[in-house]
Image (tube, rainbow, N blue to C red):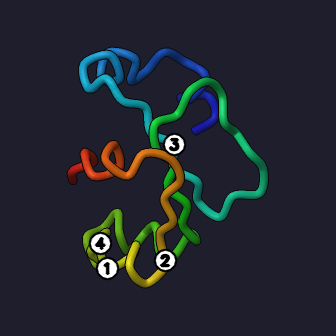
């Protein structure tokens, strides 16, 4: 993962979408580099539930299993 993130992979998609997201899974350190429009924070098991469709992201947010920092309107632009 670290090797993948150190490349420009995804830059074309970032330019097309025009927003930058950061997802923290059980964060132990702040990996923020540059401007981030929305940051999502999960515990690892909650992230897996949302990523696999076993938990609705809106329910995760309401229950506090997913925390959002930054622009809520940008966060709402994330679709499966």
Query: Mark 2 falls on what kind of element?
Result: loop
Query: Mark 4 falls on what kind of element?
Result: helix
Which label is found at residue 59?
1
| Residue position marked by numbered label 2 in the rendering | 65
Going from N to C along the chain, the mark reached first, 4 or 2, is 4
- 40 or 49: nearer the eye? 40
Going from N to C along the chain, the mark reached first, 2 or 1, is 1
Residue 72 drawn at (x, y percent): 38, 52
Residue displayed at 35% across by 69% down: 50
In contact (CB < 8 Å): disc 2 and disc 1: yes
Measure the alpha-carbon separation of dots 1 and 4: 4 Å
Q: Could you classify mark 3 by the number of other residues whose Cα lies within 10 Å: few (under 14), some (14-19), or many (20 or more)?
A: some
- 6 or 46: nearer the eye? 46
In contact (CB < 8 Å): disc 1 and disc 4: yes
Report whether 42 appears left or right of 71. Answer: right
Instruction: Give the mark count.
Output: 4
Measure the alpha-carbon separation of dots 1 and 3: 20 Å
Query: In the picture, residue 71 is in which quadrant?
Result: top left
| Residue position marked by numbered label 3 in the rendering | 22
Going from N to C along the chain, the mark reached first, 2 or 3, is 3
74 up-or-down from 34: above or below: below
Measure the alpha-carbon separation of dots 4 and 3: 17 Å
| Residue position marked by numbered label 4 in the rendering | 58
Residue 10 drawn at (x, y percent): 38, 24
Query: Mark 1 falls on what kind of element?
Result: helix
Going from N to C along the chain, the mark reached first, 4 or 3, is 3
47 up-or-down from 14: above or below: below
Query: Mark 3 falls on what kind of element?
Result: strand
């Amino acid at each position: 993962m670290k090797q993948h993130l150190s490349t420009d992979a995804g830059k074309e998609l970032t330019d097309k979408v025009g927003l930058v997201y950061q997802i923290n899974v059980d964060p132990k350190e702040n990996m923020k580099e540059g401007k981030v429009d929305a940051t999502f924070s999960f515990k690892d098991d909650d992230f897996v539930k949302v990523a696999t469709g076993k938990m609705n992201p809106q329910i995760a947010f309401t229950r506090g299993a997913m925390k959002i920092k930054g622009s809520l309107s940008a966060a709402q632009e994330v679709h499966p």
